[in-house]
Amino acid sequence: MAEVATTRRSRITPEREAELYTAVLDILREVGYDALTMDAVATRTRSSKATLYRQWGSKPQLVVMALRCQKPLRIAEVDTGSLRGDFHVILNREDDCQMEQSSALMRGLAMAVHSDPELLRAFRELLVEPELAELDRIVRRAVERGEIRADNPALGFVPHMLIGAFVARELVDERPPTQAFLMTYVDSVILPALGV
Amino acid sequence: MAEVATTRRSRITPEREAELYTAVLDILREVGYDALTMDAVATRTRSSKATLYRQWGSKPQLVVMALRCQKPLRIAEVDTGSLRGDFHVILNREDDCQMEQSSALMRGLAMAVHSDPELLRAFRELLVEPELAELDRIVRRAVERGEIRADNPALGFVPHMLIGAFVARELVDERPPTQAFLMTYVDSVILPALGV
């Protein structure tokens, strides 16, 4: 599914694509996932519904791609030469305000996912799995550089540690995660568990 | 709020209380939080709605107390003499099947919380905060025994690490957390981060 979407998207310019994604996220913030319609996206962006379906296939795929592409930097592009440096860049991709906004969008989507198997599939295939693969590459490079021992038992748990920081910040501390909080968590939990 | 509820509850026998909580959780599993009514609980348990409101105050408080009290053992009762032993007992309070059932209930409640401030308040005051305080006491005892250094930077992040294991297991691995997974996570992430 990811490949098809990529091929399809190449038919429009990156600028137009960014414009469309911005409109989708605006509507998502305004009305939520369930009430977002392809009609509304078409009207707001002055495009035809046929174009939207041709480029993205379905509403779940369009919304998930919009969420994924809102980040100003992809994890795959990060390579500072140290694991701490890589985490620092990844966690500073968005400022605190952007991070709070995208957390709110993700929470909304995570709720919609429970009653919509097609959205769950798009969410996993187009967003979760690619990001996990990119994160894994960063950790593997740290192993190759000798920063982490290849047999460190925490190696497979980097996503769990990171996700815990985001989710539990809200639940435990009733505050949104900030760049400062996340870097403290990286230094206090993730790097020590990895023996860095 | 927690104190009021405790005082009220003392008017019925522990057996009757357990019976009521079981019925509440059965209904919760059957119809979800939104559709659960005090009428349905009253009918199922052959009690009057007046009794339910007198004992628990409201639907959110009754449901949260039912969720909290379903665990066969309270964290406060755990004291094995080692942090690893304490984690082991806490994570083995429920078998894998019970853990999957209570995760599903918690997920449902976590979704309802977003549109119900009274439920959010009951959830925090009657469930999250008491459990966090009990968990903190276990970690403090490990510091007093000399298992963890008092200045270990991961000390304040034990709940974040634990919650990450539960939430990310589903999201990353598409599998429910099991006792075996959680103990591996404790040994690979939590104890090393705490320097135990």
Image (cartoon, coloured by chain):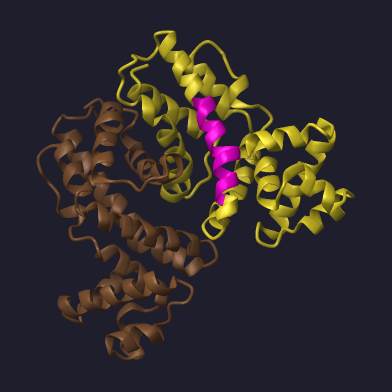
Chain colours: A yellow, B brown
- Find residue A92 and report its image quarter: top right
In x, y percent, where is residue B9? Answer: 24, 77
| Residue occupying the point 35% across, 67% down | B64
Which of the 4 quarters of the picture holds residue B11? bottom left
Q: Is residue A8 above or below residue A42?
A: above
A159 w.r.t. B167: above or below: above
Rendered location of residue B3, percent (x, y): 29, 69
Percent across and percent down for residue A139 are 45, 20
Q: Residue at x 51, y 28 (%)?
A: A133
Please state which of residues A184 and A81 is positioned toward the viewer in this rendering. Answer: A81
**Residue A121 shown left or right of residue A64 in the figure:** left
Residue depicted at 36% across the width and 71% down the height: B63
Number of numbered discs on residues: 0
The magenta-colored residue range is A120-135
Magenta residues, dominant SS class: helix
Q: Is residue A137 visible?
A: yes
Q: Assign the C terminus of chain B to one quadrant of the image.
A: top left
